[in-house]
Image (cartoon, grey):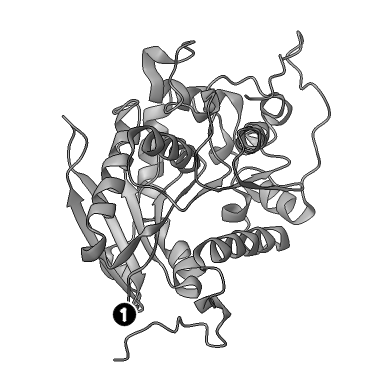
Amino acid sequence: MSVHHPPSESGRRPTPAPPFDPELSVVLDALSTEPREPITPDNLEARQARDAAARPRPTVEDLRADGRFEVAEFRVPGPPDGPDVTLVSARPSGLVGPVPLLYYMHGGAMIMGNAWSVLPRILREWALPLGLAVVSVEYRLAPRTQYPGPLEDCYAGLVWAAEHAAELDIDADRIVIGGKSAGGGLAAALALLARDRGGPGALGQLLLCPMLDDRAGTFSGHQMSGLDVWDLTSNATAWKALLGARYGAADLPPYAAPARATDLSGLPPAYVDVGSADMLRDEGVAYANAIWQAGGQAELHVWPGAYHGFDSLAPRAALSQDARDARTRWLKRLLTPAGAKSVADEDDPVPARRRTP
């Protein structure tokens, strides 16, 4: 499925790399060298500790933002023989349901990140203007928990959310699963798993610079490694941490690495978002193409000159704003019933379906 290109004998990139967007390039040049140092098996534990100490982890009270949002944490039954899973549920205050749900998985290459840090931006950019609820999943990280543990955590949380739709005041028929980077890969895998298990159906899948292919053979992987913020060494370290002895196995299931899937039929509509200067570009493009070939629906955006996670590193850049706007428009189209007016169309940016104090 992926567009593979073997590395040259010299180890050099196969072709010149596409140029970075000028605004994004300035931000990239200003980064210290520390975040861009490759992650290796030898430094993985130290990098995880450094990330955990530095990455924001807002409290429930922080996320409530002086009453703008209703926030709660749930400990729900996890997968068989696994621990309970923490879900962080948030929505604009006063929003009357049942409302759509964005079921979200954070990034961090399967080895870093947390469910809380991603919520302030999601609440501001999507929950408020679109009038939706968000559930962010605190899945277990590799290598302490290897495949299928993290994915099973996400599946258990999704099943619980769908079964408790009334309690969460959400519409179980309007659940969008999504994520960024590793979270995008988990969202793609979750869509496959839910399809094959007959689990909760999703209205759509939001795949932002998704991490889909463990084989490290794409053209863009070799073209951009060492230039992008992510590289082949770090990518291999992360996949090995997740897959352990199954890394590189010919019979690896598609739920472990969705690019391995041979049947992408019957999946919810997908939004696939990558940068032209992203190491993971080609696996995202190939995944969208495979969905089309299977008769499915996918919207693909390749942002010119964008590197991995560009909109997080340079949120004020014009390209980042364009990318956020395009994602919001897709969500709005997906969530708005035919012929109905979206809350995002109202002159008042605050959704109309609110309880008055």
Looking at the picture, tell me which residue is in the foreground, 159 or 105.
159
Q: Is residue 334 left or right of residue 198?
A: right
Say which of 82 and 313 sits in front: 82
Question: Is residue 329 visible in the rendered structure shown here?
Answer: yes
Are there few (<14), some (14-19), or many (20+) residues within 10 Å of tag 1? few
- Quick check: 189 above or below 124? above
Residue 41 in view in this figure? no
Residue at 72% in and 63% down: 318
Residue 232's spot in the image, x, y percent?
Answer: 60, 25
Work out whether residue 298 or residue 356 is closer to the camera in this orientation and state it.
298
Q: Residue at x 52, y 25 (%)?
A: 261
Which residue corresponds to the image point at 42% horizontal and 28% vertical from the top-left? 255
- Looking at the image, the residue that sits furthest to the top is 9
Left or right of 199? Residue 110 is right
The vertical placement of 120 against 257, above or below, is below
Locate the N terminus and report the quarter of the image it occupies. top right
Residue marked by disc 1: 67
Q: Position of residue 287 (x, y in %)?
A: 61, 34
Figure label count:
1
**230 w.r.t. 12: above or below:** below
Residue 51 figure quarter = top left
Left or right of 29? Residue 97 is left
Residue type at mark 1: give it.
Gly
Q: Where is the C terminus found, in terms of image quarters?
A: bottom left
Give coordinates of residue 302: x percent, y percent.
Answer: 71, 46
Residue at the extreme right? 16
Q: Residue 312 falls in which quadrant of the image?
A: bottom right
Residue 259 in the image: state x and y as whole percent. 55, 27
